[in-house]
Amino acid sequence: MASSKPILCGPCHKGEVNTKADIWCYNCDEGLCSTCLKHHKRSKGTCDHKTIDTKSYKPSIQAIKTECDKHGQQLNLYCPSHLMPCCDECISTSHSKCTGIKSLAGVVEKTKIEKSKESVETDINSILNSLKTIINNKSKNIKTGENQCVSIKKSIKKIRQEINKHLDHLEKKLCQETDIIWNQEKSKATDFISEIEVKTKSLREMKEHLQTVTSQTSKQQSFLGVHQIEQQVHQCQRYVEDLETDERVKEVDIKMKENDEIEKILRKLGSLESLGEVTVVKTEVAMNIDTSVKREAQVESQEQSNINNMTMNIETKIKINMKKYISDMICLMDGRVIVVECWGKVNLLTSDGKLQKELPIPGGVWSVTQINQNTIAITYPKEKAIKIFNMENDTVTKVITLDKYCCGLSSSDDSLVVGLNKDEIRIIDLEGNTLKSIPVESESDLDNLVYCNDRVIYSDYRGKAVYCYDESGKQIWRYTQDLEGPRGLCTDTYGNIIVADYYSDRIIVISKDGQNSKVLLSKGDGLKNSQCISFKHNECSGFICDKTSNYLTKFNLTYR
């Protein structure tokens, strides 16, 4: 749709003359009248500019950024290692160790914009189809659930007719439980559909914007515009790929397990306690997603996950000077950092290392993990307890009491994984119910562990080893080579394990299969007494903290 406001000629307007523009120049970003257009076409510096009739010009096109958001300088370089445009300041601060830096103009010149556009458009269509399929499946699932719910109620009614009025309250109770459970699942499914519809709308807007960007902008602007849209599309691709492991995608069946005592109770009604149990059965759904990110991953995953291709660089060291022995440190989803003092305070830092506040949590803490945006869980070894803390209103919302001394803590979905004494890792729900118990061996307390892809990895600094177990309790591998005192752990997106080896002042990566390792950083890089390491949420960067909390060392991890 053309602009309803008349566009004025830029050069004339600068001369304080209001002349209606006939042409819009994308390079100059201003309108031109017929007279100024003649000069514009004859000038050597502007003769090749991209112009369009003002009737077809769409002023609503989003601005394509040609300057660096961080430094405000012109984007004139391109880093092939990170696949991103950069300014001079970016190269000197964040890409100093990257090789093959190129001129952005040269990259633009060689890039086939139409091909990039087609690839992004294909990805958008693929994502839209995938999301549409999920919505259709989930909508059908809701209808099925409604029918199943009706069927369950009929079964309950039939059972109820066989017994006397003594069981009226049990029927009512079970029906209410059925409705509550189904309403919860239905609400989750409906919210999930709404979330996907928001993504769908965003993708359609990207698709429309993509057409405009490539047809009505300069080549460099087209390149940058497509690149910016491509980054947004890749975020959506990662979102869809993450749905493969998202509990919300699973099919939900509402079923009832009939109480085994019913036949007996028909003869002896006095002992009847329940008519049944309403349960939710979730079934995996094949997503069949095909996007450029996934297609590239299929080709390059072996190369990218090879630890020999990994490089870790120190971006900066932030002086925090807490000067307290620390037991744990995590990066929160919003970029802030939590640093836990041994048996002491829990400190909340901003993303640039400044102390924001001390969380009002009683002392005696050891390990911390984030459950969701506003909720963390903390272990209290001496109390044999885990406390769940809401950071939004600064309150302890639940205390889970355990039967053993507890240290290390990790989380996944709605589960907590906690290290107990030196011999057990227990997986529990947020109510404290035991889901799985894994017997392990360790010479030191289980105070550093991570839970990733149904595997539990923990470090034994006295035994100088890192262990990996599956959920069934089977030891997958044990790694001891070149370790002198492994402490902090985290995992990258490929399942490789990053270890802060305290006594050797090194950061070591162990391959996912536990067969190989590589030193990423060492004392020569400025490390000393590295105690904890954590990735920022959904990023290949994070922080390392030394034992006495003098510095937060920010690192970047690249795959070549």
Image (cartoon, rainbow, N blue to C red):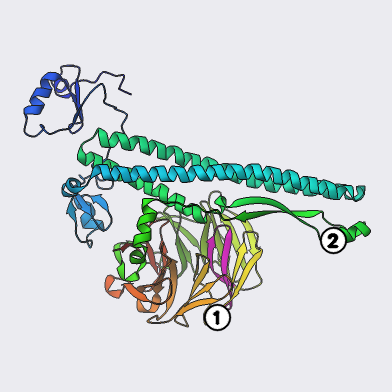
Q: Position of residue 309 (x, y in %)?
A: 30, 68
Does the rendering let one see residue 17? yes
Relative side of 168 to 140, left or right: right
Q: Marks 2/1: CA distance?
A: 42 Å
Q: What residue is rendered at 31% in x and 43% in y?
A: 118
Mostly what secondary structure, the magenta segment?
strand
Q: Amino acid at mark 2?
A: Glu
Q: Position of residue 554 (x, y in %)?
A: 34, 61
- Counting the numbered discs, the total is 2
Per the rendering, the mark at residue 261 is 2
Binning the other alpha carbons within 10 Å of mark 1 as few (below 14), some (14 to 19) or many (20 upward) gives some
Q: Position of residue 77 (x, y in %)?
A: 19, 50
Q: Amino acid at mark 1?
A: Glu
Binning the other alpha carbons within 10 Å of mark 2 as few (below 14), some (14 to 19) or many (20 upward) gives some
Occupied quadrant, residue 559: bottom left
Relative side of 48 to 3, left or right: left
Residue nearest the observer in this picture, 560 or 31? 560
Q: What residue is rendered at 10% in x and 27% in y?
A: 40
Q: Is residue 478 above or below residue 95?
A: below
Q: Secondary structure at mark 2?
A: loop
Quadrant including the C terminus: bottom left
Residue nearest the observer in this picture, 363 or 133? 133
Per the rendering, the mark at residue 219 is none
Residue nearest the observer in this picture, 286 or 522? 286
Q: Are the two marked residues, 2 and 1, in contact with CB atoms closer than 8 angstroms?
A: no
Q: What residue is rendered at 26% in x and 18% in y?
A: 6
Q: Earlier in the sequence, mark 2 or mark 1?
A: 2
Relative side of 418 to 312, left or right: right
The verdict on residue 410 being magenta is yes
Q: Position of residue 312 (x, y in %)?
A: 31, 66
- Residue stretch rendered in magenta on the structure: 406-424
Per the rendering, the mark at residue 441 is 1
